[in-house]
Amino acid sequence: MYASLKSPLSSFGNPASLAVVGASDDDAKWGYWLARGALAGRYERDVWLINHNSVTVHGEPTYAHISQLPQIPELVVVCVPAKAVEKVVIDALAMGAKAFVIITAGVPDQERLVARIREAGARLVGPNCLGLYDASSALQLTWGHFSAGSLAVVSQSGQLGLEIAGLGARAGIGISRFVSVGNQHDVNAADLLEDLVDHRATRHVALYLESFADGARLVQAIARLARAGKRTIVLTTGASESSKRLAHSHTGSMTSALDAVDAACRAAGAIRVSTPGELIDTAQYLEAAPLPAGHRVAVISDSGGQGGIAADLISRPEDKAASGSAAKLSTPTLSSHLQLELAAQLPEGASVANPVDLSGAGEADMHTYASLSEAILRSGEVDSVILSGYLGKYGEDTPSTAQTELAVIDAIGDSVQRYGRPVLIHSMTSQSAAVERMWTRGLPTSTRVERVVRTLQSAHALSSVRGRDLSAPGTATIPIGSGYWGARQVLSAHGLSVPRGMLVRQRTDLHAVAERLTGPYVLKAGWLEHKSEYRGIALALSDVASLEAAYDDMVTRLGPGQYVVEEHDVRDDVVEILIGAQRDRNFGALITVGGGGTEAELWQDVCTELAPVDATTAETMIDRLQVRALLSGWRGRPAVNTEALAAMIVEVSRIIASDPRIDEFEVNPVRVGVSGAMAVDALITAGESAATA
């Protein structure tokens, strides 16, 4: 969408000509700003203004109707009353116009209008949008003013998009492209993201969406941007329309629409933030500083109080509402050798373990800030540094120290450049020449320590997500039977471990149990989704007589049906885990892992990724669980076989990704012991096209 390269959407970035229908001299109307912006770029293109009530707008002659234009406009911007929009579009299509931006909201019969545009081979942004801007081609067709820069904004909410652009301007972040997508009846967010891959001015992307239709394409587009070195920062609300959950399993009630969005971000190499301010803080960081290579943070402070608060914020459990990332920061104890090196520069008794307390050394010699930062960065023991205190305000309070302060900041900036590890500064001022120097030297700065920590968390999360291959592993053809027995067959066909068992349709089938299975036994009402709630499962049945009694009781209470008898898994030191797979209507196949058993919904200990996953991703999912401590061995218990669990996660993720017949597949519990992982209950919810056995 810039002059040197024509893209499929080039008419919305660098049209050879454009017409503004509804141009106005009234600065309270949209037509005023559209006409003003269009005229500002007329050295790049032909611009025509249309207003049937005015002879001139902004001192330029106007046309009463679009059909009177001397040439065919490549782009038509429409800002007229809703009932007049269709006539404008029909007339423009008759002339041969190929692109439309419709600002107007509430356009009647939008589907019919869009169909006309598509039939003519034309494209549409909107209706109900706030326009677009492209710094590369001097195209501004929206309200207000923009400063050129490196951040592209694609927003479903025009007003929120303008807020992001405004916050960016105040932070010194200019806009490379702005598109308000409106109702997305034709051109959608995925189209626009794909078009940004080759947009030279764009280095970072801000994406605000309220719904995630065409989610698979969105993931692919964001991944392409990441591979091109352009990271996407996603902002959304509850995304309540982005996912339709099924209520059959525990998984459906334990995961939210935002879990799917976060999984999509991780798979694509993006992050989600929770506010426009956090988005701009992250974009500002990306403009200034290198991403941290790991989670280890050193805190240097003027006082123990400031350092302690920063360390507490770092160690606080990360708010999943922000990035949804597994990335956690930590403040490791520095080595004894490094502590000795730091202590030699500080007053006796100063804390040097981490946090490092200057204990007044900064006031005695401002260069201490730089020398300590350099020593810590050089050591390689941490991946980033947060420096909290008075640096940045010395020269503001005492002008005679201003040059020394600037020299110290330059020295810290040199260390960041030399070692490739970021230093973020919590300062007590935001307006000084020293703070300005901090930003120019690649040192992200804020007057609020929580913003500093939050920004570092976002940067670390972004460095931790690199995207991954989501190619489906072929198409499954295994028949899907009903109930638990059918789910067992699918698991077995894919090589996953289940207990030895047999299907029981009538009481006489129990006579063969002793010959085929070894007690103790488990009896299950195979058609029930939540067996324990209906007493549809009986455990530790020691012999066939006990089994027959349990069977008689269940049939009396629950009626006839497919019952399953299995050998009871009696292994010691087993941890129960849930593996759930489901099909999101926007993002496709998802895989969820969590604490399992009948209390799964109570603990809500889950993590979700887009399927399929590889072994590395599966192991990362396990590591993110609180129940991980039990898997590793707890209070003298042995560690269980997490490799077998990871392998089962991988295979279930491949099943959901390869079999479009399956809407939901839950394996709960998976009993994980020292010897391996065994699925002892499962449920498949399949579409009508699934074969039955």
Image: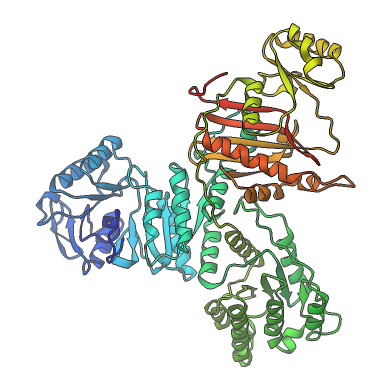
User: In this view of the protein, which residue sits in the foreground, 53 or 480?
Assistant: 480
Colouring scheme applied when the structure was drawn: rainbow
Q: Position of residue 481 (x, y in %)?
A: 59, 21
* Foreground residue among 346 and 143: 346
387 in relation to 193, above or below: below
Marks counted in the figure total 0
Residue closest to the far front:
515
Describe residue 296's horizontal placement relative to residue 100 as left or right.
Answer: right
Question: Which residue is at 11% across, 55% downward?
Answer: 69
Please name whichever residue, 97 or 277, is drawn nearer the observer in this view of the structure. 97
Is 107 left, or right, of 171 in this rendering? left
Tell me: 447 left or right of 588. Answer: right
Q: Residue furthest right?
A: 636
- From the image, which quarter does the N terminus lie in? bottom left
Whole-percent x, y for residue 38 in the image: 25, 62
Q: Quadrant of residue 174?
A: bottom left
Q: Is 363 situated above or below 654?
A: below
Q: Is residue 407 visible?
A: yes
Residue at (36, 65) in percent of width and height: 145
x%, y% of residue 71? 11, 56
**Could you tell me which quadrant the C terminus lies in?**
top right
Q: Is residue 582 above or below residue 266?
A: above
Q: Is residue 538 visible?
A: no
| 188 on left or right of 283 | left
The image quadrant that residue 50 belongs to is: bottom left
Q: Residue furthest bottom?
A: 400
Report the front residue among 121 and 407.
121
Percent across and percent down for residue 125 are: 31, 49
